[in-house]
Image (cartoon, rainbow, N blue to C red):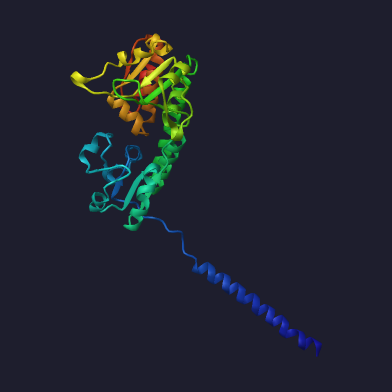
Amino acid sequence: MPRIMKRPGKVALCLSLLALLCLLAGCRQGQQPARTEPRPQRIVSLSPSVTEILYGIGAWPQVIAVSQFCTYPDDVKSKPRVNGWDKTNLEQVMALKPDFVIGVDAQEPFLRDKLTGLGVRSLFVKSQTLADIIASMKEIGRGTGHEQEAADLSVKTQAEIDAVRKAVGDRPHPRVLCIVDRVPGTIRDLYTATKGSYLDELISIAGGDSIAPQGDHGYGKINKEAVLTLNPEVIIDMVQGSKGNFGEDPIAVWNELGEVLAVRDKRIAFADEKASNFLTISCPPRVFAGCGIYTAGVQSVLKSGPWESICACERPNEGYDILREGWV
């Protein structure tokens, strides 16, 4: 009798285990594979840096429109333009019927929710530092179906940056002040590239010591008295004043601070308009050319002196050509 009474308990236990196994099997069967987005075929780029990365990873045939600020590659001239930056013209965007819109982090607060509401997939990548830029290559590669190409580009870019750093490693490391904005014709309302900015990193790679005080988001405002106190050995002036008869004389502008070493020794590099645009609104895959531009600006004024002018490189590797041929 006792054995008969125990048997139902064993049966119940077995049935419970069987039910649990069935439940688990059902759960596994009901699990859906992770959703993979199809490779986009109608990409709109809202930033020059994004456009250059798309070109560099081989996604250019998928791009149907670019930002009004894009200048590279040359084929951007054949693409429709989208107006605006933080206030991007979404009517223009939607008229193009995109399946993927890519911008940078500074645009995200203004655009992501609106694009989501319109049913458009979007991606906004960080773009403030070189590490951000390398990471954004990989992220854009994943989003566009060019993951391997993006990985290759990021490795190549990092290697080229390291090569520039090594090439100038045993050269002087002057104190550098990079002016990104001022009132044309004057040295009022001076804005500098500060620690943490993309431009600050380029100065460091090029062999300079960026001395601007810490600023918000990598840029800050200083006055003439601060320039006197900082006493830079090299000044990189990226400001483009008026042209023609009303154009400024950059030498005369800085002569107001004749006590500053960079002014006294005529070690000022003036970026032409093309270089200024490239370095202030653009990022890789031509980041290495940016290193070359800054190396030219920092090192050439030490070597050959007065009032050097630096210009944007036409080719991705032209920065290395400059170094190799000893022009700096």
- Tell me: residue 182, above or below residue 259: below
* Quarter of the image with the N terminus in it: bottom right
In the visual, does 65 lie left or right of 17? left
State the residue at coordinates (26%, 18%): 248
Quarter placement of the C terminus? top left
Residue at x 81%, y 87% (from the top left corner): 2
| Residue in the picture at 39% in, 22% down | 294
Up/down of 13 relative to 103, above or below: below
Q: Nearer the viewer, residue 83 or 303?
A: 83
Q: Quadrant of residue 71?
A: top left
Residue 321 image position (x, y, % from top left)? 35, 20
Q: Nearer the viewer, residue 97 or 319?
A: 97
244 with respect to 317 (left or right): left
Question: Which residue occupies the foreground of this view, 152 or 86?
Answer: 86
Residue 269 lies, in percent from the top left, at: 35, 17
Q: Is residue 172 among the parts visible in the rendering?
A: yes
Is residue 129 visible to us here?
no
Q: Is residue 47 above or below residue 158?
A: below
- Residue 155's x, y, as percent? 45, 34
Report which quarter residue 301 is drawn in.
top left
Residue situated in front as seen by the camera: 120 or 185: 185
Q: Which residue is the extreme one toward the right?
A: 2
How many marks overall? 0
Residue 105 position in % (x across, y down):
40, 43
Q: Quadrant of residue 167?
A: top left
